[in-house]
Amino acid sequence: MKKSLLVILLMAIVVISSFATTKIIQVNVTDTTGVPVPVTMTMFQVRNLIGVTFPANWESLRVYQDGKEIPYQIDDVDMNGHISGPDILAFCATGPATIKVSDDVSVGAPHYPNLFKVSKNDTGGYTVSTVNGILKAVVTDHGLINITKFGKVNGDIVDQIGIARINGFPHSTYWANGKVGGNAEQTSDAFKVVYMKILENSPVRLTVLTKLEALPFVGVYQDLITSIYPDGDVLVNTTFDFATYADLMKLQVMITHPLSNLENASDAVHILPVFRRLIWADQQGISPLEYWLQRNAIMYVNNLPYIVFPISSNMKPPYWGATYIFASEENWRSNFSQDLGLGVAEILPHTAPLYDNYSKWMKGNTWVYESQEFRDGQFEWTPGEFYTNPITESILNPSNTPAQWAKLAIHYIPGDQVKFVRLYSVYNAKSITKAIQYLIQRTREFRSVKISK
């Protein structure tokens, strides 16, 4: 009788399997550098692509490239212990890939080896490294990433990936009486930690989940999904959530000290495409290219100009101390040491919009390079020089009185969100020219991912 029951069960499984349906998702990836391209999508997206009524067995999910199975992971970003919509499917590819999901309940989950080792350190954070020893990093108790080894280079390569800088008026009563009160500024390393967790599963990347309250800005939260890849990429998804009213003058994401604290990197330069807009150039009635030519900071690669200058120089700005400020976001920027053959870059997922309306543009995201920090986001303070120059005198209201501060501040209300997606990349190149060529290619690769049924 027991043998008969077993046979019946086996036959049932065979019958079910023979009628199993497989759904397929196509992922187009273009890779010219040979460095695997990060691919991510939420399980909401996966579900919608295969059909919301399809009875998927998620353990059957597989990813293939060139007909071969490649590792993937699903990050439990809502930390509920099972697969749900916000969770992130992640894998890396060097060409077109296929995701397959079946309704066959007999298929079990795959098992891929982890690429990272994690150990607790004595500062309240974690020390992490790839199993092959190529990359090492420290995850601070606030979930920020310091890269301490890449390839043959050991030391302080780049600090505080994921850090934010917030400035504004934490005791503002603007919505009641139009007044903003005293000003304050703080960065993520001093925010209140709500939680910080490193996910154990790392066959593709090591993911850190962090939630910080941006005190003294009560009710403003920074949510971070930070993923370290073994090839030196760090993908950071930052969401600022507003649970209350907030009046801010700065809301910026950053990295600090890229190569500037590293021994034997005294030759390091800052490189990026020429800005589409730089207010200092506009005020002088010249182009951004002419502005940097005046400072002997232009290098041509394949007949295109790029800004190149020593990372330690402020390049004689017309006013204020930042090397550049009130500058358009471009596709990428990097610090690079030819002596070490090492660079640290910031890459944007999309080309940032550039509005004809100056006021609208100034209320959006711009780039700052100051104090060895890549600052990226909203910056509303304006100098007196704006109002003595005919080009900028009418862009915004002067900011030298509290009454004017209230007009310049960005007024957030409960339920507002601001999101940043940035790829920070530690990479190798043999020369400045090779670094520029690599970053052009890497930007295209990062943006090449297209997902369809």
Image: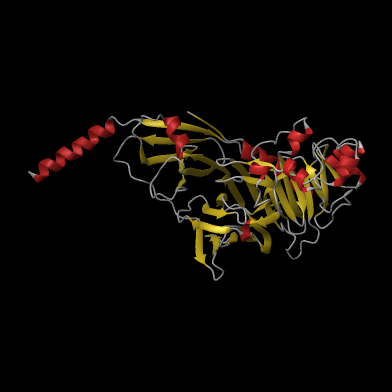
Outermost bottom residue: 122
Q: Nearer the viewer, residue 410 or 2?
A: 410
Q: Nearer the viewer, residue 407 or 441?
A: 407
Lateral position of residue 177 relative to residue 294, left or right? left
- The colour scheme used here is secondary structure
User: Is residue 164 at least partly visible in the picture?
Assistant: yes
Image point 54% across, 71% down: which residue?
122
Q: Nearer the viewer, residue 329 or 56?
A: 329
Lateral position of residue 327 relative to residue 410, left or right? right
Outermost front residue: 177
> Percent position (x, y) of residue 156?
68, 63
Image point 89% across, 39% down: which residue?
283
User: Is residue 442 at least partly visible in the picture?
Assistant: no
Quarter that holds the N terminus: top left
> Percent position (x, y) of residue 139?
57, 60
Lateral position of residue 27 relative to residue 156, left or right? left
- Indicate the quadrant where residue 69 lies: top left
> Percent position (x, y) of residue 13?
23, 37
Image point 68% across, 42% down: which residue?
410
- Indicate the quadrant where residue 101 lies: top left
Placement of 130 over or under 413, stated as above or below:
below
> Percent position (x, y) of residue 123?
57, 69
Placement of 5 over or under 452, stated as above or below:
below
Count of residue discs: 0
